[in-house]
Amino acid sequence: MSSITAIVPAYNEELSIGSVILSTSKFADHIIVIDDGSRDRTAEIAAKAGAEVIIHPENIGKGAALKSGFDVVKNADIIVTIDSDGQHNPEEIPKLTRPIEKGEADIVNGSRYLEKNHNGTPAYRRLGQTVLDTATNMNSELKLTDSQSGFRAFAAYTLPAFRFTKTGFSIESEMLMDAANQGFKIMEVQVGVNYKKSKMAIHTKNAMTHGLGVLVKLLQDMEFKRPLYYFTIPGLVLIAIGLTLGLIFFGRYLDRQMTTLMPTIIACMIGLGGIFVTFTGIILHSVARMIQSMGK
């Protein structure tokens, strides 16, 4: 039987952390709670509920909290991450661990949307998550439906793959990209979500800030990992715009509808800029491929 350790990052979750730990303990042999600079009784309650508690003196982000948890995992076959706000149902932990135990997957992602069910997710959050899913999939060449899920299971041998360079919420995407780069098999299973228990459902401004922050980090990664997406595609768009506008403006000049070639020149400059950006993407892509082949 597999030994399971659950990692629970927490920040000011004194109202929910106790029940999360007690429910999770039915399915995990060991629970590690990382109190990420909470100003309430989160750490105290977590310890009384039976969890090992790691305390960050200051709030430094979910990515840093997960790193602290993964760093102290010992003698576990499977590691499960679960959020501390009560939005996940610990009863579903076996759904995540079973494919790993059967050798069907190395990592299992608990998806709220695998079955095309929004699960009560607020519309603005689902829109933002769709954008982040698309960016993550482009970066990793995966086809996941919920890249921002905090409910996941990992085979212990996958742990060295994770860099933990992101300290904030973008860690969810980074871990998927790291796993994909190492060739690990990632499976998704449908899980439920209870936003009535989650504070994030009511903090619209925080959710928007979170989403934009994650997207910026993904675009920064894309610049180096997927230059064809980051440079070449926008470059081709600029070429098309420049060519189209150039033909229109030059045609109007020939028909004497315009008395200056300046708009045509500007359109040509847009097109030339697109050519430069396109070739930048192609060159960076070639360099990245060459580096990858040298590293094998």
Image: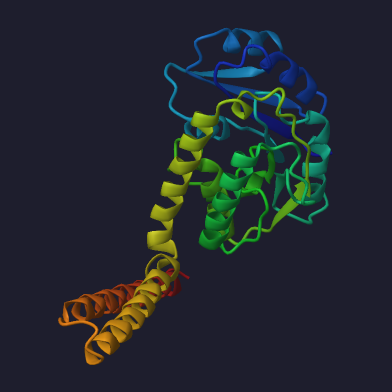
Using the rendered image of the protein, determine whether residue 85 is visible from the camera's viewpoint. yes
Q: Quadrant of residue 66?
A: top right
Q: Is residue 235 left or right of residue 89?
A: left
User: Extreme bottom residue here?
Assistant: 254
Measuring from the top left, give residue 75's x and y in whole percent.
67, 34
Using the rendered image of the protein, determine whether residue 164 is visible from the camera's viewpoint. no
Residue in the picture at 61% in, 16% down = 13
Residue in the picture at 52% in, 56% down = 135
Residue in the picture at 61% in, 25% down = 202
Q: Is residue 245 left or right of residue 148?
A: left
Q: Is residue 280 left or right of residue 169?
A: left
* Residue 188 or residue 279, whichever sits in front: 279
From the viewer's perspective, is residue 130 above or below residue 153? below
* Residue 27 or residue 109, whichever sits in front: 109
From the viewer's perspective, is residue 118 above or below residue 12? below
Measuring from the top left, give residue 184's x and y in whole percent.
64, 58
Measuring from the top left, give residue 254's x and y in whole percent.
23, 92
Which quadrant would the N terminus be assigned to in this image? top right
Measuring from the top left, give residue 126's x and y in whole percent.
63, 44
Residue in the picture at 16% in, 82% down = 259
* Residue 216 or residue 42, whichever sits in front: 216
